[in-house]
Image (tube, helix red, strand yellow):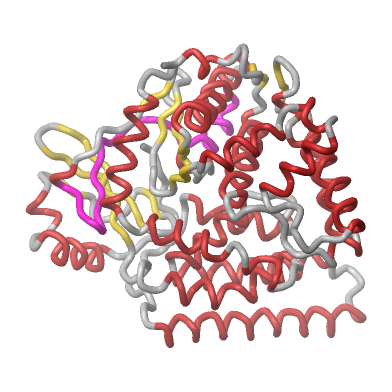
Amino acid sequence: MSGKKKNKEQDYIPTTKVERAGKFISTGVKVGSNYVKHYVAKPFNKNLKKEDLDKENASDIYNSLSSLKGSALKIAQILSMDKNMLPAAYTDMFAQAQYSAPPLSYPLVQRTFKKEFKTSPEKMFESFSTSAINAASMGQVHKATKEGKSLAVKVQYPGVADSIQSDLKLAKPFALKLMNVKSRDIDHYMKEVEEKLLEETDYELELKQSVQLTNHCANLPDVYFPKYYPEYSSKKVLTMDWIEGAPLKEWVEGNPSQEDRNKVGQTLWNFYHHQMHSIRMFHADPHPGNFLVNDKAELGIIDFGCIKKIPKSFYNSYFELTDVHTLEDSVRTAELFSELEMIKAKDGKKEKKLVMKVFVELIRLLTRPISAPTFDFAAPAFFEEIFEMGERLSKDPELKQLQARGSRHFIYFNRTFFGLYNMLHEIKANIVTTPENAQWMKIA
């Protein structure tokens, strides 16, 4: 594992509802003040741009969420993964939540160990770094040694599990404003997000899921995983092998060869599709901070806190729609749309026609990578089309009248596919994508 300690350590995290609500309110006031200052100054300064306001607001919101940690910061991380959802100033700033959040000071880490193990990190391990090596939304990682092994010890931030429900309520107005959607359009999905965030704060569950997923994927070529240690883990602390490798973003910035880009991209693709199709559960946190690349261009995979299990009915309907031949059958497509809650029982002919038109077009575009033997994710045209379609659909007055569409299971599926596509685009990988040729189909 690799990381860079860039941020000043944080000595305190607001944990009560009152404290956290106060932080959200003060941030809202600051953002409102930024708007007032911007539009008052604009008549006198023609060089002021909306991008300047976005940068100032993004910085203020991110700094606030960083101090709160937990689900508040996790929301920023999720938003940063969709380049079409927010202005670039927000996605660029929020991307820091993936692996470069301000870390906790060491006394707070010691306090967690005393509570979990009745001892200190120094007594539990032969050595333990007092400064965090990596800090993200839910916890931070320290490097330790024990019996000659280098270990990564993930320590959860205090209070994050207890504040998830209230944080989601407090963060909702920000999300509605930033994404320009109505409350009714996201209420249907809040329970799914809440459940997953609660799972991410249970390190005993993560330990179990980590062992299960790594065992299932052990035979995939060019991947490596850490070993996990239950004896040094608890509900708030998770210990695993320290595995070497550069974070994916840093590796890409090192300008690797096209051969290595293709190899790492193919490994990523195989990893995700093997999980989805062979074991029907998958690593649903696909951001660059969770992937390492070693000097052999092998892919190290960490952080199995967010795992999505796929119900059989959803799997069958979802992947039937990815077959281009299915979309040519309007009757069957409409049936699948109903099964996946994209068409609702109360929809009239006008709504059904609009949903069919929009989503068939969208599915044809997004499934293009698996409609040909290979796909070049380096080519910008595909991503420009996605962006242009997103812009067009977001401004369509008829679509704005429709409620949110689709099963709640779409949330983590869409997040995973968009995250995977974005990473493959950053890598500039040209890979084999069709099932009949893919390596993951050959893994037992």
Instruction: From the viewer's side, name the closer residue of 45 and 66.
Output: 66
Quarter of the image for residue 383 reads: top right
**Relative image position of residue 168 (x, y in whole percent):** 52, 71
Question: Residue 80: x, y in percent?
Answer: 62, 54
In this rendered view, identify the residue nearer to me: 208 or 318. 318
Q: Tell me if 240 is positioned left or right of 4 in this view.
A: left
In the image: residue 31, left or right of residue 167 = right
Q: Indicate the quadrant containing the N terminus: top left, top right, bottom left or bottom right.
A: top left
Q: Residue at x 46, y 38 (%)?
A: 281
Residue beneath the point at 42% across and 47% down: 4
Classify residue 45 by image quadrant: bottom right
Specify whether 94 is left or right of 329. Answer: left
Asked if 407 appears above or below 178 in the picture, the reply is above
Give the residue at x 44% y 45%: 307
Q: Quadrant of residue 92?
A: bottom right
Residue at image location 51% in from the left, 19% down from the top: 440
The C terminus - image quarter: top left
Residue 194, percent from left and from top: 48, 64
Q: Look at the image and give the residue range highlighted in magenta.
A: 232-256
Is residue 235 on the magenta stretch?
yes
Nearest to the observer: residue 270 or residue 404: 404
Q: Is residue 300 above or below residue 404?
A: above
Residue 157: where, in percent of width, then height? 33, 64
Q: Is residue 294 magenta?
A: no
Q: Is residue 403 above or below residue 407?
A: below
| Left or right: 373 as drawn, with respect to 99 | right
